[in-house]
């Protein structure tokens, strides 16, 4: 009896060719949209900015800032000390302090070098138009080894890739249940230690508590890897592609690592902070430069991703173990004959 050919029917080949020809341009268009759109539309949108000084003196400053409709969210403070505290607490990105000698701009380049530069240009130009000179003070500066914050922003993609690789490896190696959870946690912990050793000890781009930074790296990696392995445990290997697509095409470009979430077009900035790359970047800035200020929100986001992902890994294993393995019909028939 001739053996059936494993070659797919000829009618399927054209359909697969068409699918590939259509799918590749669609993916390219999505990638271009996800990465180029936020970069092309970068501008302040309700950016938290403080104004400090007597109400009568700050009224003119607020009026001038209000001309940029929708650009700034104004926070009022009594004096420069209160404005500094707000910057260090990550309530605002900077503050304009009205003094008898002229306006003084307080910034925090560690929160976002791009925002600090934008504020300095805006206030300097306005002061020049009024015939005065604006003094700029960087309250929380970036590290000397990373003055533009480029190295910190570049850490987003490697962490995302490491998380996706760990989650995919656990899935493809067939690890399940507690073994899978242990492998994911162990890999994330090791990645966190290595990342902190590189970023803090070697490159010197982070200046906070070493172990806290390692914990942020680990939690960010675990949030991604657990999501990959968890969804794969529930729906199969397609889960790897779904989470990877979400992290790479939305999480990375929407993270605001190169500027700030409030500098991205809506709702990209908000979406980015719901995803591990954006939450991880925000948490790392808080831990490394601001003594943990405003760290609760992003820490909870990453914790939920990790917890739900690990829970899905355990649940997927439980569902598989409860599903009875049906014997092939030929084996049942042979057993009955025997």
Image (cartoon, helix red, strand yellow):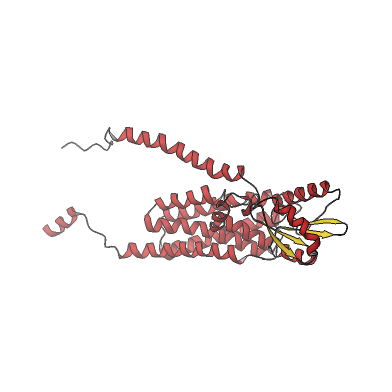
Q: Nearer the viewer, residue 163 or 305?
A: 305
Quadrant in the picture for the N terminus: top left
Give the number of marks.
Answer: 0
Question: At which x and y percent is residue 296?
Answer: 60, 67
Where 99 sits versus 67, above or below? Answer: below
Residue 124 in the image, given as x and y percentages of width and height:
80, 49
| Residue name at image x 66 percent, y 52 percent | 71
Name, please, the residue furthest toward the left: 337
> From the viewer's perspective, is 188 left or right of 320?
right
- Residue sitting at x 58%, y 55%: 278
Q: Is residue 274 left or right of residue 120?
A: left
Q: Position of residue 221 (x, y in %)?
A: 55, 57
Question: Is residue 58 visible to us here?
Answer: yes
Work out which quarter of the rendered image holds the C terminus and state it.
bottom left
301 vs 168, nearest the viewer: 301
Choose top left, top right, bottom left or bottom right for residue 41.
top right
Query: x and y percent of residue 81 in the render?
Result: 79, 66
Q: Is residue 107 visible?
A: no
**Is residue 276 toward the left or the right of residue 135 in the image?**
left
Residue at x 42%, y 62% (from the top left corner): 313
């Amino acid at each position: 009896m001739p053996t059936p050919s494993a070659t797919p029917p000829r009618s399927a080949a054209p359909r697969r060719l068409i699918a590939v020809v259509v799918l590749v341009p669609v993916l390219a268009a999505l990638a271009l949209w996800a990465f180029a759109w936020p970069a092309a539309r970068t501008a302040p949108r309700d950016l938290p900015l403080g104004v400090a000084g007597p109400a009568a003196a700050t009224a003119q400053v607020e009026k001038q800032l209000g001309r940029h409709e929708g650009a700034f969210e104004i926070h009022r403070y009594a004096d420069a000390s209160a404005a500094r505290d707000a910057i260090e607490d990550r309530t605002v990105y900077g503050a304009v302090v009205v003094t008898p000698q002229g306006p003084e701009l307080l910034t925090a380049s560690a929160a976002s070098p791009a925002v600090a530069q934008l504020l300095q240009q805006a206030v300097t130009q306005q002061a020049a138009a009024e015939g005065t000179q604006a003094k700029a003070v960087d309250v929380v500066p970036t590290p000397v080894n990373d003055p533009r914050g480029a190295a910190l922003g570049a850490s987003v993609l490697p962490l995302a890739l490491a998380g996706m690789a760990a989650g995919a490896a656990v899935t493809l190696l067939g690890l399940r249940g507690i073994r899978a959870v242990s492998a994911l946690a162990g890999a994330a912990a090791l990645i966190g230690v290595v990342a902190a050793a590189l970023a803090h000890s070697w490159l010197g781009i982070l200046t906070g508590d070493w172990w806290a930074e390692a914990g942020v790296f680990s939690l960010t990696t675990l949030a991604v890897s657990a999501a990959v392995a968890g969804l794969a445990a529930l729906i199969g290997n397609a889960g790897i592609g779904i989470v990877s697509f979400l992290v790479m095409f939305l999480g990375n470009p929407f993270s605001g690592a190169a500027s700030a979430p409030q500098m991205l077009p809506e709702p990209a900035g908000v979406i980015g902070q719901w995803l591990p790359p954006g939450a991880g970047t925000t948490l790392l800035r808080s831990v490394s430069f601001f003594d943990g200020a405003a760290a609760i929100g992003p820490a909870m986001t990453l914790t939920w991703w990790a917890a739900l992902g690990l829970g899905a890994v355990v649940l997927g294993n439980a569902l598989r173990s409860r599903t009875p393995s049906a014997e092939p019909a030929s084996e049942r028939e042979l057993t009955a004959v025997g």
